[in-house]
Amino acid sequence: MAAVRRNIVTNAAARNAFVEGVKRLKAENVGVTTGQLGIPGTSKQLSTYDSFVVWHHRAMSEFTPTTQGDRNAAHRGPAFLPWHRHMLIVLEAQLQRVLADPAFGLPYWDWAKDGELPKTDQPKSALWKATAIGGDGDPTLGGAVPDGPFSDSTGWRLQVASDSNGVLRSVDRPLRRGFDVARGLPRKADVAQALARTSYDVSPWGSLSAGLRNRVEGWVPAASAPHLHNRVHVWVGGDMLPASSPNDPVFYLNHCNVDRIWAAWQKQRPTAAYRPPQTASTDLFRHRPDDPLYSIFDAGGNGPPLNQMLDVSSVYTYGSLAVA
Ligand code: CU1
Ligand code: CU1
């Protein structure tokens, strides 16, 4: 039976299960050390949760093709939505396992709803309460999150993180946030503009493309201003900024909503095809339908084919597709 993904703000059971599940994955030794993975710094055991951070960082470092510096295996290209859909499905399965609940559905954060609030009220959303997922970082603590289930006092500590040069290093420190209150979250009208795109993606298949994917990812309309998905990363700030952003469980709540927007678009436009087609240039490897999604958990870095992510109705559904 397909899992149902629900709103984390209005569904306390889904929220509590999510928090409990990620804490169990964080406490579970995956059996690999950072040293074995060639990650610089003091070698330490990685948790199952941390292995997803490594996966995301590596996907972001894998340029497709290697001769350019824009599109990578999971971002700034058509695979952005299917790759993160796959990542969420893999995490959701791990959460179902440690929660012993095969019906568990990853919750989403409907950030465009909070985006309708005055900017100074947005950090007061119920999501950020200590009884939910904790709030903003404390500048007097170097940006560390002081309350909630991922504060230092609960034992939630980062084991791998990007340094200022983007290199993934072994670390041992608290989770950091730094809300960009002045910028504000994306609004429903922004989501509606993305949904109005008739094409999934278009040439040049990067961060300059028009089309649904790049609107949702947030490099357009103007690359200088982050929109939708990118803006949410920037708004939360701290550890949500670099390639190691899955360190903050908010990463998954954001991406679940990003995926929900794609699902809503797919439902509105059932005849709109994924683009590019398989006949596109091999420069678009990992972004064409039959290409394998990049995965560190599969031999050769080759996960399931991208096209397996285009209809996932047997895996999960959303309690609501009201996104805009
Ligand atoms: Cu990502
Ligand atoms: Cu992201």
Image (cartoon, rainbow, N blue to C red):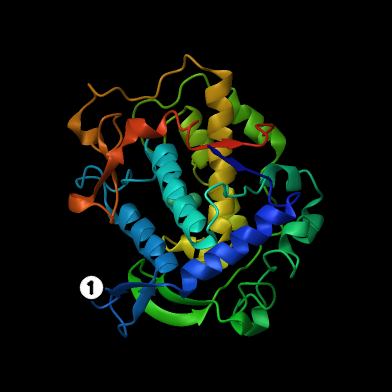
Q: Position of residue 204 (x, y in %)?
A: 34, 30
Name which quarter of the figure residue 309 lies in: top left
Q: Nearer the viewer, residue 278 or 31?
A: 31
Relative placement, left or right, of 177 versus 44 is right
Q: Position of residue 33 (x, y in %)?
A: 29, 76
35 up-or-down from 62: above or below? below
Q: Secondary structure at mark 1?
A: loop
Name which quarter of the figure residue 163 lies in: bottom left
Q: Position of residue 153 (x, y in %)?
A: 62, 84
Extreme residue in the top direction: 271
Residue drawn at x 48%, y 32% as measured from the top left: 314
Residue drawn at x 71%, y 59% as measured from the top left: 181
Name which quarter of the figure residue 82 lies in: top left
Are there few (<14), some (14-19), or many (20+) residues within 10 Å of tag 1? few
Q: Position of residue 223 (x, y in %)?
A: 49, 43
Residue drawn at x 40%, y 66% as measured from the top left: 48
Q: Is mark 1 within 8 Å of ligand 1?
A: no
Q: Is residue 183 at least partly visible in the picture? A: no
Q: Nearer the viewer, residue 226 or 310?
A: 310
Relative placement, left or right, of 45 versus 88 is left
Quarter of the image that includes the C terminus: top right
Q: Which residue is mark 1?
A: 38
Residue drawn at x 62%, y 47% as measured from the top left: 108
Q: Is residue 319 at least partly visible in the picture? A: yes
Q: How many marks?
A: 1
Identify which amino acid the numbered label 1 is placed on: Gly
279 up-or-down from 8: above or below? above
